[in-house]
Amino acid sequence: MFRNLQAIIALLLGIFFFYGANGLLTTVLALKSQLAGFERGLIGLLASGYYLGFILACMSGKNLIAVSGHIRAFAAFASLATISVLLHPLIVEPITWILLRVLSGYCHAILIIVTETWLSSVTPAAARGSVFSVYRIVELTSITLAQLSLWFVSIETSTLFLLIAISFSLAIFPITQFRSKSPGAIKTPQLKIRKLVEVSPVAMAGTFSLGLALGAFWGLSPVFLQNNNYEPYVIGWFISMAIIGGACLQWPLGRLSDKIDRRKVIILASITTSIIAILFSLFASAHFAIMLALVFLFGGFSIPIYAICISHAFDYSDPGEFVEVSGGLLLFYGIGAVIGPALISLLMGYFGDRFLFLTIALIMLTLAIYGAHWLRLGKKLSLDMKNRFVGVAAADDIFELDPRKQKRGEE
């Protein structure tokens, strides 16, 4: 048990440095690409490239991990992630940055697969829920704290790239310094889209819509704020408050979805997110305190939708289908996150920056209307037939692609 505790602590330390670096890199690239004079469409492709790499890793990464093992895979891809970060200030050219972003998305997905499957393997079944709750806290805390770097370091220098690279390198050290038996080979299920549509069209539409909206939000909102004359440190707080809002309202909305039809909660959260997005467009130059309050609510109502969609799909699935369903929903989220930034950045280029949040509002309103349509037509579950809600972020479903999780959960 002591050795397992050492392994868990080492993994959580690696996760802390990795997620902080990854979250800060997304913000820094959006701001630096704007300063470098990249066109809006190219800035959107930076965000899309990341999610494209992410999806490719979900499809092929298991083979690379099987060949090299978890420790070597983590060290190798963390090193590649570090190199990709350091190349950005050396080659300031949009196509190169997009390709580097695909590479970083691929590396980051591999690192998440390694850490989450490994963390599961060293955690006793009885403690797995608690450990993964701590994992989520570490993840959100590191991303939030990393954004505050914009308070102290000028965005006009290359220092932030160096700090991000250092953080990726620091993630390697604790992972490689403990002895633990690595998990077995990772096997991914065959994803059947038709089956997913039959199980829950609302969950499928919800994850896809959320990918469109949040993929654009994370990649393009720093550009939106920068063009409305907000200082970089305010932008850092802005991103942090969205994450904090999502963390604070995840549990209340999840509990509400346990008590009433989850589709009603998805509709409510989507409409609220749409209204807040419209307010962003109307008050784009408001005092930063107002913007922080709005983004807290935006993150609070939008981020939990993913977990509620997962829970809703599980309500209509057999336990043996959970891995397939969650993997399929992750794929739809990723596809949306590839399309969203690229498409919305083009609209911003043609019609102005306000179209970022106007388009997000339209996406979320469309989801609400679609959900209401299926609510009117669809079947209902009694409360005792529901699976209990468990908060999860989109990235966490890479872990769901490992069928060993289900087997261990039954032990």
Image: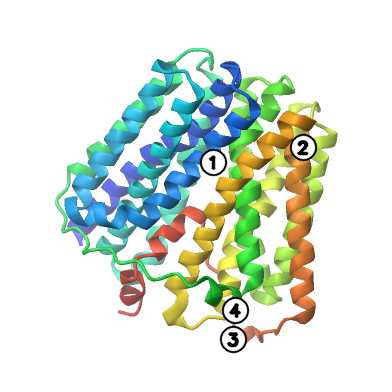
Q: Residue at x 42, y 18 (%)?
A: 91
Quarter in which the N terminus is drawn: bottom left
Q: Is residue 249 visible?
A: no
Q: Residue at x 53, y 64 (%)?
A: 329
Number of residues whose C-alpha sits closer than 10 Å to that of mark 1, classed few (under 14), some (14–19) or many (20 or more): many
Q: Residue at x 65, y 84 (%)?
A: 383
**Which of the pair 345/26 is nearer the observer?**
345
In the depicted structure, whether residue 186 falls above or below residue 340: below
Q: CA distance from mark 4 to mark 3?
A: 18 Å
**Which of the pair 195/279 is nearer the observer?**
195
Q: Which mark is residue 385?
A: 3
Q: Mark 2 sits on what residue?
A: 355
Q: Mark 1 sits on what residue?
A: 48
Tag nearer the camera, 2 or 3: 2
Q: CA distance from mark 3 to mark 1?
A: 38 Å
Question: What's the residue type where badge 2 is placed?
Answer: Phe
Label 3 or label 1, whichever comes before in sequence order: 1
Q: Quadrant of residue 343?
A: top right
Work out which residue is located at the far right of the displayed protein and give it. 282
Tag nearer the camera, 4 or 3: 4
Q: CA distance from mark 1 to mark 2?
A: 18 Å
Q: Mark 4 sits on what residue?
A: 198
